Amino acid sequence: MASRRTAFAFACALGVVVLSSDVAGAAEPGAEVSDHIVLSGDVDVPRGTQVGEIVVVRGDVTVGGVARGDVVVLSGNVWITGHVSGDVIAIGGRVTVGADAQIRGGVLARGEVTLEPGAMIDGAIRERTAFTWRSPVDVFGRFATWLAMSVSTLVLGMAMVLLVPRGLDGVASIVRTSALLAIAWALAIAVAVAVLVILFVASLVALPLGLALLLGLALLLFVGYAVSAYAVGRALWREPRNRAAAFAFGWLILRGVAAVPFLGGPTFVLAGLFGLGAIAVATWRARDTGGRHRERRLTIRLDDVAREEAGL
């Protein structure tokens, strides 16, 4: 009973942060199917209709049509009379499979699994399964990854706001004034790193260096992603009094896009590379600016020396 309460509490917290993925998927024009993620309420897929993944925290699910993904219910029962391409999982209820139903995956349920004659299930059938705290993580692998990435980038971005606020402002200015140059630098960085990794990995002697370069690039992508989030927040919310609010605003936008299925990985890589390109441009310009300042100071000193000698 305790494990069930733990699983349900975990899923509730997770379901709150991923509700936007259902809204985004349903709002796409021309989309054939959309995922259904519901905190509380029943889901009914009538015959002749198709959906993607079905995730219900509290409620019952009836599938008479086609579900192209998994059907997962944390607290409720499942009735399948149509077709399911993935698994059917009832963490806190029972599953009933009708005579004409087809399930390509398996069936897992805490309660009973009732099969009517003629039901076709390709995977394993397990009933009265004791789900533990790890079960929601296994079931919601994609959503758990989204949540972990969201927390990690939020913590990193807020740390950068506290430690290097002026640096973030400089990079945000580069994004507003020289976005194309930042993109060019991002492409150059991606190509250069790819070539170096291929060369190092192809050589057994330099293989550890190639692996270290990949790990370093992963860390830099996190930094670039946080920078991109801040730049997005500053671009849409000009000169906010609170830098943390600007970052949070941009972070919410990027994480909302990443919640859409199949966009999380590409969004992270593209935003990370763009942020690295903007950092490279800002660093190069700061270097040039510093050099010009040193030259100006040297010129001023020489002028002062010349005046002193002339006075003598």
Image (cartoon, grey):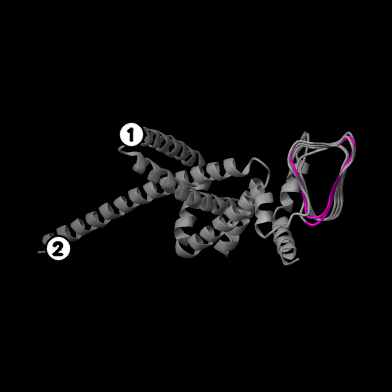
**SS class of the residue under badge 2?**
helix
> Which quadrant of the figure has residue 163?
bottom left
Q: Residue at x 27, y 54 (%)?
A: 294
Q: CA distance from mark 2 to mark 1?
A: 63 Å
What residue lies at 46% left-to-right and 43% top-to-bottom?
Answer: 277
Report the quarter where the C terminus lies.
bottom left
Q: Quadrant of the N terminus?
A: bottom right
Image x and y of residue 273, in percent: 49, 43
Q: Position of residue 224 (x, y in %)?
A: 49, 49
The residue beneath circle 2 is: 308
Q: Is residue 105 magenta?
A: yes
Horizontal and vertical percent position of residue 103: 79, 37
Task: Give the mark nearest the N terminus, 2 or 1.
Answer: 1
Magenta highlight range: 92-114
**Magenta residue check for 251:** no
The residue wearing badge 1 is 203
SS state under label 1: loop
